[in-house]
Amino acid sequence: MTATDPAEAASRPVPISLDPSIAPPGTRNFRDAGGIPADQDGETLVPTHCCFCGVQCGMYLRVDKGGKVFGVEPRNHDINRMRLCPKGINAYQQVNHPDRLTAPLMRRSRDEEFREVSWDEALDFTVSEIRRIQEAHGNDAFGLLGGASLYSEKTYLVGKFGRVALKTRHVDYNGRLCMVSAAGANKLSFGIDRAANPFSDILLTDCLLIAGSNVGECFPVMTQYVWGARDRGAALIVVDPRETAVARTADVHVALKPGTDSAFFNAVLHVIVAEGLTDEPYLAAHTTGWDEVRKAVQDYPPARSAGICGIPEAQIVQVAGMFGGAGKAMAFHARGIEHHSQGVENCLSVINMCVATGNLGKPGAGYGTITGQGNGQGGREHGQKADLLPGGRSILNEEHRRQICRIWGIEESELPTAGTSMMEMVWQMQRQEIRGLIGICNNPFVSLPNYTAVKQGYDTLEFHAQFDFFLSETATNAHVVFPVTVWAEDEGVMANTEARVVKHNKAQEPPAGVRTDTWVMCELAKRLGAGDKFAFTSSREVFDELRIASAGTVNDYYGITYERLEETGGIMWPCPSTDHPGTPRLFEGGRTYHPDGKIHMQVVEWHAPMDPYNEEYPLSLTTGRTVAHFLSGNQTRRLGALVEQTPRPWVEIHPSHGYRNGDPVRVTTRRGSEVFPALVTEAIRPDTVFIPYHWPVPTAANALTIDALDPRSKIPEYKVCAARIEPAERIDEVPAPPTAPGHEAYPATQVSRTDPLPPTSSQGRGTAERS
């Protein structure tokens, strides 16, 4: 039989394309809007997306004939193509978890215990406290904090509810702790805030640079694109103080000292200029500010920046040659370079490198931020950020204000001005400038830096309410806790890292006594006298108003409908009309969203981190996520398989310090000290220690981090502070997650939680290795 024999050819497996936009034959039939009958009797599969990170993997929730979610199946969606990470596989277990809140909790004083009350009593008490505080101290004495894991419909309502019903300027959200440095840099450079390229462009690049992102643990399914690029022969550069799983496979791993990123990228651009690797025709045609940037980077020769960064000078030259000499190059970054008092500058320095080499707006050539929270992109687009209105409009722009007031049906004089950032609001709580607060989908007692200051601020509040589906550490400090739905009990949209808007579908009815965040905000608004502005009965109705409110802006959702999302699997904004295909790739042809259409390059100067080193505090403490947990851990610390995989935090330290695995090590900063088991590894710099941040005090990394802020983005400097380590007697215990009155901690998460040992590697301990 010859190689060209038709029978042999027919027997060969059909190759699967690396392009995620191309699905294997027949699989697109399974991207249906409604439930899909499954093989089991009475079971249905509801297509939706994961509730966790910004990749937004497609999945099916398995629903039994009684209407209850009981399992998950991967979905052959364009984003993930049948892949799910450990968090995605276990996410469904939240839905019917025994720790779910199923009735409002209330107390009139923190000296009292919580008691379950009716919805009317909880709502009436909340409204009476809002009125009492605002009548005595003004509307701005009450604040509202939203969350970037909410559906976009709900984030839109957070901004509207705060400004129209509460009538306060103090509205912000926990994306302030995540994306705002990248957002600030994007707006300065491009006039728009989103990643420039879809994931599929990674497969086409010749050189991929990843800075400050532990992709293998934080965005595991995104690694398929990294490996796809590598399979094509693309070079890989990773910039990170730790040798993460992806860094271990890189052509170049730049293990720079925390807090030195912009010095490194300025030096790379210095070499690119010196070696003639810039794209001068592109720069002349499409940019402003290039002459000033070129002049500024002359002050960052490799020798100087190598000394600042603690790396070999030759690495800077090597990276410049690889990135600048590639036919097509891409750069992605995440919190590792954004969580700094110079976070905006760090992002700008990466943008400058991409623009100077002409790597923008082309297949396989571009730039992007990897969003952390599920709706980290969509959550900052439609008005819950202190300075923004829907559609990314500025609350300080008179025309933008007039546009929104017309849509909302309010007088321009009624719309408050810009508020302050999340951390600044805590300081205002301490000073009693903010006396009341509602928090929605956030857990600042774990997620904000400098826990002592956060606790003092919240303790000073006269009234505090939280929306949540589990009792978080922050909610235990509140006066009222409203039990709300999980993602599978409502429908709505999120925008992932690519700015691809995807639709989540409702899989089951919420438990009796539980309401949607939308219902609670609308009900509070009605009782505050603004019910006519919040007459929404469904997410669809909110989304239709959001579409109108975004029309004509750079964040244009007008052409996106639920029906189109269900048909296509996702549309990347801007999408100005219902026959528009969306915009997967920005800046094609070199045009940006500034009025002049140019890229506005920005001069970047490196400065030292805000927490100074000395003999008492000689080391750098940096923080991050693990593969098994998510953000403050309020969800994942309740799921047995994830707790067993990674039961507790640890401190990663270099062998040169003389510790053995499991030794108790006290980590001390100017904010406090805690004791962790040592994870001794050569995969970290000798002058740096790392602690994952998903746990509360007394094992909270954020009890140690500094609350210094970037002056432009107001993001905290989580990723570097001065520290010291020393031997200790006993490892601090991990507390059990909080539970409602009358409930005990879920037994399946308690066995491994008290394990004193660190994981066997920085990836966490696998369940097969436990006895």
Image (cartoon, helix red, strand yellow):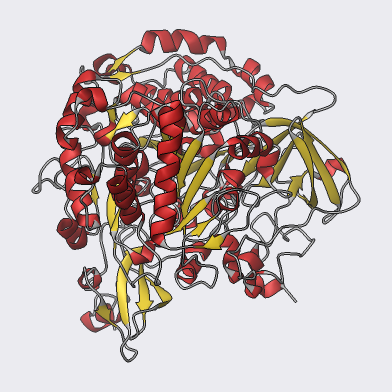
* Camera-nearest residue between 128 and 599: 128
Residue 287, by quadrant, is: top left
Horizontal and vertical percent position of residue 98: 54, 73
The percent coordinates of residue 711 (x first, y second) are: 51, 20
Look at the image and tell me in which quarter the C terminus lies. Answer: bottom right
Q: Is residue 681 left or right of residue 297?
A: right
Res 412 quadrant in image: top left
Q: Nearer the viewer, residue 738 or 134?
A: 134
Q: Residue at x 29, y 65 (%)?
A: 505
Q: Is residue 54 left or right of residue 312?
A: left
Q: Residue at x 34, y 52 (%)?
A: 151
Q: Quadrant of the N terminus?
A: bottom left
Q: Residue 635's spot in the image, x, y percent?
A: 53, 60
Of all residues shown, which one is farthest toward the bottom? 41
Residue 43 versus residue 82 in the image, above or below: below
Judge left or right: residue 666 versus residue 46.
right
Q: Is residue 457 above or below residue 592?
A: below
Residue drawn where x is 49% and y is 28% of the image: 321
- Residue visible at 51% across and 71% down in the picture: 97
Relative to residue 143, is residue 90 depicted above or below?
Answer: below
